[in-house]
Amino acid sequence: MKKTVILSCAALTLLLVPAIGLASQVDRSDWGRERAEFRQHMRDHMREMRERSREHLRDRDEVRREARRLRAEARSQFRDHASHLRYHYDHEIRDAIRDAMRDVHRSLHNAFHDWR
């Protein structure tokens, strides 16, 4: 009886060891396949992120170019009208200073004319 139990255990071991080995190889191949899928997923994700970043940079550069163009256009329009605005502004200041100088001259003249 002992011999049959030992022999049956040995036969069972001989049959189960290769089956367990094959099962572990299947697990390894599944792990390798999952790892390859994960790597591919990460590559795809990183490619998408790079494309989004490039698109964002392109959009930002386009907005900056448009802002520069609008700023240059506004400056050009202001320069076209600035001489007209400056002319009136300068004349208004000049007239105000001239009136103030006349008033000062009159008041000084009156003050010192009475002094004599």
Image (cartoon, helix red, strand yellow):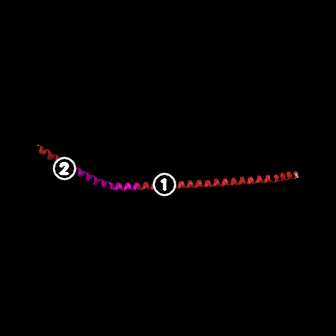
Q: Which residues are magenta?
A: 71-99
Q: Residue at x 42, y 55 (%)?
A: 69
Are dots 1 and 2 in contact, CB under 8 Å? no
Q: CA distance from mark 1 to mark 2?
A: 59 Å
Q: Nearer the viewer, residue 21 or 55?
A: 21
Q: Nearer the viewer, residue 19 or 32?
A: 19
- Looking at the image, is mark 1 or mark 2 earlier in the sequence? 1
Horizontal and vertical percent position of residue 98: 22, 50
Main SS, magenta region, reads helix
Image quarter where the C terminus lies is top left
What is the residue that sits farthest to the front in this orientation? Answer: 1
- Secondary structure at badge 2 equals helix
What is the residue that sits farthest to the left in this orientation? Answer: 116
Q: Nearer the viewer, residue 73 or 15?
A: 15
Relative horizontal placement of residue 85, taking residue 71 as reference (left or right): left
Q: Residues within 10 Å of mark 2 (few under 14, many from 20)?
A: few
Q: Mark 2 belongs to which amino acid?
A: Asp
Q: Residue at x 30, y 55 (%)?
A: 85
Quadrant assignment, res 48: bottom right
- Is residue 93 a member of the stretch shown in magenta? yes
Horizontal and vertical percent position of residue 112: 14, 44
Closer to the observer: label 1 or label 2? 2
Q: Residue at x 83, y 52 (%)?
A: 9
Disc number at residue 103? 2
Horizontal and vertical percent position of residue 82: 33, 54
- Secondary structure at badge 1 equals helix
Relative horizontal placement of residue 8, taking residue 93 as reference (left or right): right
Horizontal and vertical percent position of residue 95: 23, 52
Relative horizontal placement of residue 47, taking residue 85 as reference (left or right): right
Q: Mark 1 belongs to which amino acid?
A: Arg
- Is residue 78 a member of the stretch shown in magenta? yes
Q: Residue under circle 1?
A: 60
